[in-house]
Amino acid sequence: MHRSLWRRRALATFGAILVAAGALTACGDAEDSGGGDGPLRVGYQRYGSLSLLKARNEAPGVTWSLFESGPALTEALKAGSIDIGETGEAPPIFAAAAKIPFKIVATSDEVPQGEAVLVKESSGFRTFADLKGRTVALNKGSNVHWLLVKLLEANNMTLQDITVQYLKPAEGRPAFDAGQVDAWIIWDPYFALAEQPGVKVLADATGLASNRQYILAAPDAVEKKTDQVRDLLTQLNTTTQWGIDNPEERARVLAPELKIPEDVAKRSLDRSAKSLAPVSPAIGDELQAIADGFAELKLIPEPIDIKARVDPQFAGAFT
């Protein structure tokens, strides 16, 4: 295929996922309350284990709401419009700093290859240190925010050494393509969609950040919808493991849900879809280190106790 035609089709595909992801979409009765009598209201992104559960229709009776990013999902928790949802490792920190009530009820294995710094091949950048004095785009408060912190630390740099431009995924890709920023730090599947001729992966999170996924639940749901939360997590664990055992079929099932080509879905899922796991004191320590790092850099207004948000009562769902 001629490169310009390929590029137009790729951008059209990417635009479709961003348009779809940019809207908050609810399936079912949007007026359900957060009490114990209504269905479990699940927030998801067009990626992660919950999207596979939805695509396979293996959580009957729940309602679904779609979000572009983790920070948007935690705002829905704050508003009381969802009971449970999945984010990366940084959104819980920013949400806790904003006094949003939630519990952390599950996590995943590490996913360091699922987020990366992208640059243009023509830029000549060879290491992250080459970005000193340059403009770097990322989504504020998302998993890649912590990756930026760790990259700066690893390269003996500070936030003052670069110009950070906070852009949502729908804004970051056009800015990157147009050369308005020198680098874009992004996660899958946007990462996989952006991998095309002329784009170089400068670094990923290997050795720097765990990039786990986290399941957050509203305290009211944990208390009043305990069985529903446990049932969802149990099925989520089963479905996630099915996907790991059946990568080809997983890509076929998820590509329409993600609104991306099947080969792109498979590439991103092969590196980013990991087993779920119960939360533990060690997970609390890992999150606390992230929270302390953000506080030291004044990226959150004050220190927080994120370890207190870890709730291990649903560990049995992962046995």
Image (tube, rainbow, N blue to C red):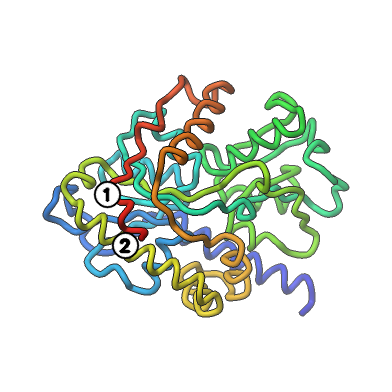
Q: Position of residue 55 (x, y in %)?
A: 40, 71
Q: Position of residue 310 (x, y in %)?
A: 36, 39
Reading the image, the residue beneath label 2 is 234
SS for callout 2: helix
Disc nearest the viewer among 2 and 1: 2
Reading the image, the residue beneath label 1 is 83
In this view of the protein, which residue sits in the foreground, 22 or 95?
Answer: 95
Residue 257 quadrant:
bottom left
Q: Mark 2 belongs to which amino acid?
A: Thr
Up-down: is 304 above or below 54? Answer: above
In this view of the protein, which residue sits in the foreground, 1 or 275?
Answer: 275
Q: Is residue 37 left or right of residue 61?
A: left
| Residue at x 61% of width, y 42% of height | 209
In this view of the protein, which residue sits in the foreground, 284 or 272?
Answer: 284
Q: Is residue 160 left or right of residue 101?
A: right
SS for callout 1: loop
Up-down: is 165 above or below 4? Answer: above
Residue 98 quadrant:
top left
Numbered label tally: 2
Would you call the spot at circle 2 few (<14 residues within 10 Å), some (14-19), or many (20 or more)? some
| Residue at x 49% of width, y 59% of height | 19
